Amino acid sequence: MANGVLVYVEIRGGELTNSSWESVAAGQALAAGLGTTARAVLIGDGAGSNAAKVAAKDLAEVITIEDAKLATYTPDGFAAAMVAAIRDCDPAWVVFSHSYQVRDFAPRVAARLDRALVGDVIKLKVEGGNVTLVRQIFQGKINADVTCRTDAPGMISLQSGAYRTDAARDGSAPTRALSVDLGSVRIRWTVEERFKDVKGAVDLSAATRIVSVGRGIKSDENLGLVNELAAALEAEVAASRPICDSGWLPMDRQIGSSGQTVTPQLYVAVGISGAIQHVVGMKNSGTIVAINKDKEAPIFDLADFGVVGDLFEVVPALIKKLKE
Ligand SMILES: Cc1cc2nc3c(=O)[nH]c(=O)nc-3n(C[C@H](O)[C@H](O)[C@H](O)COP(=O)(O)OP(=O)(O)OC[C@H]3O[C@@H](n4cnc5c(N)ncnc54)[C@H](O)[C@@H]3O)c2cc1C
């Protein structure tokens, strides 16, 4: 009988992706809720060399699949390898992160196994052995509870930031190389060089402090105020989407579902309402400070410290205090 949880751990450019650790954390939580164990599978070049890092987590086993046909990512090759891993493990649940690569090949895996794939899940709830998946609908305005009615395995992909990377528990797992016969698999795609949205993009995910600016700033001419606050806090500057859409800051500064996901120790939201698409990118920050003139702004539901007031008065006062 299908049992346990299988987590797909993604390798990009030879390195494990950050969101894979979130999937490991989710897989562990799901397994614990079901009273079972989680395993991980790594596919392609770098699977073997990265296995030890994953094996240092609390998992029952780490499986690696390497083959000449998996040397570079292709949906045909990776789907075939993942199907083989699922057949080998017979898990009750398969957990992916909702990355571009997963969006490319995981539906193929689900279709081949005739199982459901629930995408972009933000939360897993386990009660009495039943698993409910929470995903957003109507552009994030409503959270929907979803259950899988197909036979096992249920498959899910998790929205970036849904689980914390540091929630992945340490442990010690054996590793196993799974040999898969891909001889009959026809690779119909050639993957070209990865494109980068922005040249020299900043990696805000590594920032410890972020001052993030929203539409409350009114005009790009006022951005100096935010830059000054960021300088006083030795923080990086980030923004909500409208600021980047307007070209006031480059796209690589955008936080949210279509921007970066960050977990700084300090996140200061200046004139940001707290729309769900923004919040998913910063909700796991250590301390959240919000400055907003509307006391009903949703960002205050999340903030550890809130200042209800006009940012054009609050921010200069804050800068003055910080400089003192
Ligand atoms: C598919 C999709 C993807 C999206 N992806 C993202 C994403 O990745 N990131 C993102 O941020 N958004 C994203 N959005 C947009 C998102 O829905 C919101 O529209 C956006 O986050 C709002 O930005 P904001 O808070 O800066 O602006 P607003 O919602 O307009 O809020 C401005 C805030 O400033 C306050 N304010 C105004 N004047 C002052 C003042 N003088 N002093 C203090 N406060 C003031 C107001 O009270 C208000 O709360 C996405 C939307 C969709 C549909």
Image (cartoon, rainbow, N blue to C red):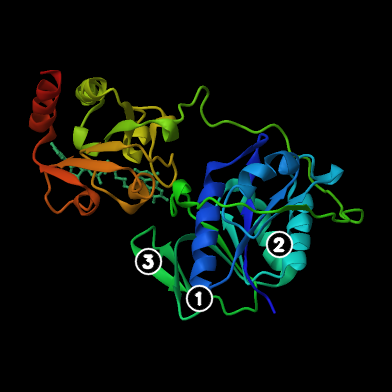
Residue type at the position of mark 3? Asn
Question: Depth check: 44 or 149 in front?
Answer: 44
In the rendered image, the residue lying farthest to the right is 183
Residue that numbered label 1 is attached to: 147
Instruction: Please say if 156 is above or below 178.
Output: below
Residue 275: give x, y in percent of width and height: 30, 51
Task: From the top left corner, tell me how far across and down residue 266 is, in percent.
Answer: 28, 36
| In the image, the residue with mark 1 has its CB under 8 Å from the nearest atom of ligand 1 | no
Residue most extreme to the front: 172
Mark 1 falls on what kind of element?
loop
Which residue was labeled with disc 3? 143
* Location of residue 289 in the rendering, given as x and y in whole percent from the top left corner: 21, 40
- CA gap, disc 3 to disc 1? 13 Å
Q: What residue is shown at x 57% (from left), y 30% (from top)?
A: 196
**Separation of disc 2 and disc 1 at Cα?**
19 Å
Q: Quadrant of residue 218?
A: top left
- For the image shown, how many numbered marks are present on the structure? 3
Residue shown at the point (72%, 38%) measured from the top left:
49
Q: Is residue 161 above or below residue 248?
A: below
Question: In percent of the image, x 43 and y 39: which residue is there?
Answer: 260
Ligand 1 sits in quadrant: top left
Q: Specify the label residue 161 is tagged with.
A: none
Nearest to N terminus: mark 2 or mark 1: 2
Q: Secondary structure at mark 2?
A: helix
Q: Give the image quarter of residue 156.
A: bottom right
Going by the image, does 222 lie left or right of 69? Answer: left
Respond yes or no on whether mark 2 lies under 8 Å from ligand 1: no
CA separation, marks 3 and 2? 26 Å
Q: Are marks 2 and 1 in contact (CB under 8 Å)?
A: no
